Amino acid sequence: MAIVGGDDLTRSFDPAAAYPSLFASGIRWRAGWGQAAEEPQPLPLSLSLGERLLMSTRAGDTGMIVANVAFESIDFDASPEDCAALGRDLAGRAERVAMIVMGEGSTCMTASDRARRTTEADVYDKAVMRALEHGDYDALGRVGGNSVTTTGQAPWRVLAGAAAGHRFEGRLHAGARRRDRGYFVASWTRRPFGTNVDR
């Protein structure tokens, strides 16, 4: 399992010492047994939210699952090549790798930016939504060229790098409704070669 999200730096976190925390965002919440490590490592916002999602899917928290989780942040401004390289590295660490990727739509825009650039924001969001819905890693790796948003592009490109060369069936769980604009929840399931899947 790998959790990937954007941050100011590209770095790996020690799963034995990492723990989710929202303190840096002004919210008094943190969790996880990594707090008791000799050198605890609070996760950045994107990875903290990703770890919170993982925590919500398991009953109890013995730490046994966390030991097999890689926490990887990618620089918001990382080049497409660096993003793809990290994706390939993560995908190659085991025969099967599950990923939680914390990308972003145009939600990170300020209210004034959105008011001035509504059309660009909508184009960006629709491109992300289509790529996620269809499991299209080629399209996902290309989104963001209009610079509407910078914080969400790098994680999408990491996912594209990890998925390259394989076929996926995408399912969009949230994001198609107008009130969900800029927020997406999707899942990709890898298809064996030879399976007919429309892309």
Image (cartoon, rainbow, N blue to C red):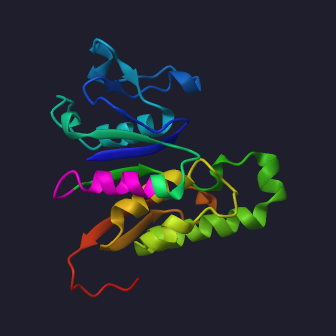
Q: Main SS of the magenta segment? A: helix
Looking at the picture, does residue 168 appear above or below residue 40? below
Q: In the displayed structure, would residue 78 be above or below residue 168?
A: above
Q: Is residue 103 visible?
A: no
Q: Residue at x 51, y 72 (%)?
A: 139
Q: Nearer the viewer, residue 156 or 182?
A: 156
Q: Report whether residue 64 is seen.
A: yes
How far across and how far down the image is residue 49, in percent?
44, 38
Pinpoint residue 60: horizontal percent, then vertical percent.
20, 32
Tell me the quarter of the image containing the C terminus: bottom left
**On the picture, is 63 further left or further right than 80?**
left
1 to the left or right of 186 = left
- Looking at the image, which residue is at 20% across and 77% down? 192
The structure residue drawn at horizontal position 30% and vertical position 29%, both measured from the top left corner, is 14
In the image, is residue 29 above or below residue 8?
Answer: above
Q: Position of residue 119 (x, y in %)?
A: 76, 67
Q: What x and y, as percent, mark residue 68?
A: 20, 39
Tell me what residue is drawn at x 31 percent, y 42 percent: 54
Q: Magenta residues, as a range?
A: 83-96
Residue 197 found in image quarter: bottom left
60 magenta-colored: no
Q: How many marks?
A: 0
